[in-house]
Image (tube, rainbow, N blue to C red):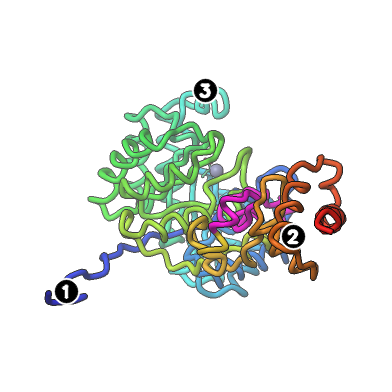
Amino acid sequence: MPKRSPSRFPAPRLTPLILSDTTLRDGAQMPGVRFSVDDKVAIAKALADAGVGVIEAGFPAGSEREIEAVRRICAEVPGPRIMVLCRAVAGDIDAAWEALADAAPEGRGVGIFLATSPLHRRHKLGKSKAQCLDMIGRAVAYARKRFLKVTFSCEDGSRTEPAFLRQAYGVAMDAGATGIGFPDTLGVLTPEAVRRRVRMLAALAHPRGVRLRVHFHNDLGLATANTLAAVAAGADIVHLTVGGIGERAGNAALEETVMALILNQKQYRRSIGVDPAKLTGLCRLVSRLSGVPLAANKAVVGANIFATSAGVHQDGLLKHPDTYLPFRPEAVGADGIRLPLSPLSGKAALALRLAELGIELSPDELGRTSRIMKNAGKEAWADEEALLRRAAAAARQASL
Ligand code: KIV
Ligand code: ZN
């Protein structure tokens, strides 16, 4: 049979997806996080090194320190576009200019937000729809006098009436917005609902050459799934944070989104320009500087991702690593596979651990040691090595 030529199966054509990291802005809003200016610069450098294309570096109207951090990032971190967040008021846009004035025009931009949901309009802003639309138009037009890149976001967009959402974005685009942002501020949407909203917003933005950015919070644990649904439905830019840190339950996680897009490239067909091998280092850096620990079961970069204690999984991993790994440790720059022992472990991992301790046993002795280990109580397991040595000695004794 003639061999199929590889050219009959061309690699899928990939459309660029822009990853915009907001660790230094939304991530910095997480209770307990207090990044120093040096921390922010170090994280921005690590993001640039990983290939992240856009960094939302802060909220300049917040403080002089925020302005200083943004200025230093612009000066010391070449590569990514630096964005900052502003409320829809002139003073915030002036502060953004103070922070970004020295950056190259193409390399900087502002994200302006105004809350548009009925709850926020009534209770937080005390403004009518008409007043909100007026603020949006004026703020975007004012920002466009200085910035080439201006994205307007409806805060609490997911709880805003669809008709008013369309109106608000329409006003922003008429005033010159180059991007519109759709935040699910309270993390209430499901992937199905995201698909519908994003299709509607893409149909609004794309014919005008405007980019659509999405921003998902994780209150229902759906932020990454929602981000992927938005990508499939036509979003151009996704807002993410390292380790998923951010307000309340955090934001869609950069490392999760990157790996989901890479592993499912045929489905999503998007190029992202991020080096996955940098992900573990990046997440550990942000965890150290933010003080937010990486849970052992954290997707992609948690300590347990390449570890298993269960006998069946350990046996499979020892026979072929891909049996129980979604990707290899080196793909995300992790340390390697670990097979910690537990009462559920089998003989394969036990033999390996005994060999590490220089203990050689016959197959019978190994079987007896395994039984002793499986039946040992929680207290005995507290000192695993001592338990193992005692069990091996008892097993040997029994075979004398
Ligand atoms: O969650 C949100 O609505 C935000 C906006 C300010 C973009 O972070
Ligand atoms: Zn947010």
The secondary element bearing badge 3 is classed as helix
Front one among 263 and 2: 2
Picture layout, residue 134 above or below residue 96:
above
**Residue position for label 1:** 4
Residue 124 percent location from the top left of the image: 57, 28
The secondary element bearing badge 2 is classed as loop
**Amino acid at the residue labelled 2:** Ser
Q: Residue at x 50, y 42 (%)?
A: 223
The disc at residue 122 is 3
How far apart in space, not on screen, are marks 2 and 1 (Cα)? 57 Å
Front one among 331 and 252: 331
How far apart in space, not on screen, are marks 3 and 2 (Cα)? 36 Å
Q: Residue at x 50, y 64 (%)?
A: 320
Residue 156 percent location from the top left of the image: 49, 34
Q: Residue at x 66, y 61 (%)?
A: 338
Q: Residue furthest front?
A: 400
Residue 139 percent location from the top left of the image: 46, 46
The boundaries of the magenta stretch are: 287-316
The secondary element bearing badge 1 is classed as loop
